[in-house]
Image (tube, rainbow, N blue to C red):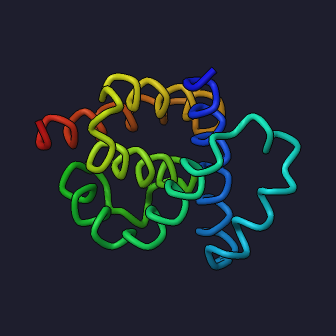
Amino acid sequence: MEPQKRHWSRRLALQALYQWQIAGHDIDVLLAQYVEDENWNKVDKDYFVELVSASIRENESLNVIISPCLNLPPEQIDPIENAILLFATYEILHKPETPTKVILSEAVNLCKKFGSVEGYKFINGVLDKISQQRA
């Protein structure tokens, strides 16, 4: 059950971080909205709160790590793909108990579902570079 709860935490974190980029809501407003989500009971709530809060709070430092691994200017990244990069990079750096291949697999699968057609290749390439640097 735990991996499925983490999956839903990442999925809702993706939605929250997308919304944060587009609408600029603060952390408390975002978190309050997702308590009402129909999938909230499927989520590891603490993990979701951590992913969203930390990705927003540490946005600048995460982008310092992400930017050198990009093959395009950061402002050209699709907001869905940027959201995935933020929380997955946070996980790579701060969740050593989670295997990197699990983080990359989840990120790629979420991008296949919600991102651009070829976006998953971009996500995989960037996160692979980040994970190699952190190894």
Which residue is drawn at the image coordinates 30% and 50% (left, top)?
Answer: 94
Q: Residue at x 31, y 33 (%)?
A: 97
Q: On screen, 42 above or below 87? A: above
**Which quadrant, please, contains the C terminus?**
top left
Is 118 displayed left or right of 71 in the figure?
A: right
Where residue 134 sits: x, y (%)? Answer: 14, 42
Q: Residue at x 35, y 31 (%)?
A: 98
Q: Position of residue 89 (x, y in %)?
A: 34, 48
Q: As rendered, which of 126 and 41 lies closer to the eye? A: 41
Taking the image as shown, residue 127 lies to the left or right of residue 41, namely left
Within the image, what quadrant is residue 132 found in? top left
Residue 115 lies, with reference to residue 54, above or below; the image says above
Residue at figure coordinates x 23%, y 66% from the top left = 64
Res 58 → quadrant = bottom left
Residue 121 image-quadrant placement: top left
Tag count? 0
**Relative to 59, is 48 on the left or the right?**
right
Q: Position of residue 19 (x, y in %)?
A: 68, 63
Residue 72: percent from left, percent from top:
31, 54
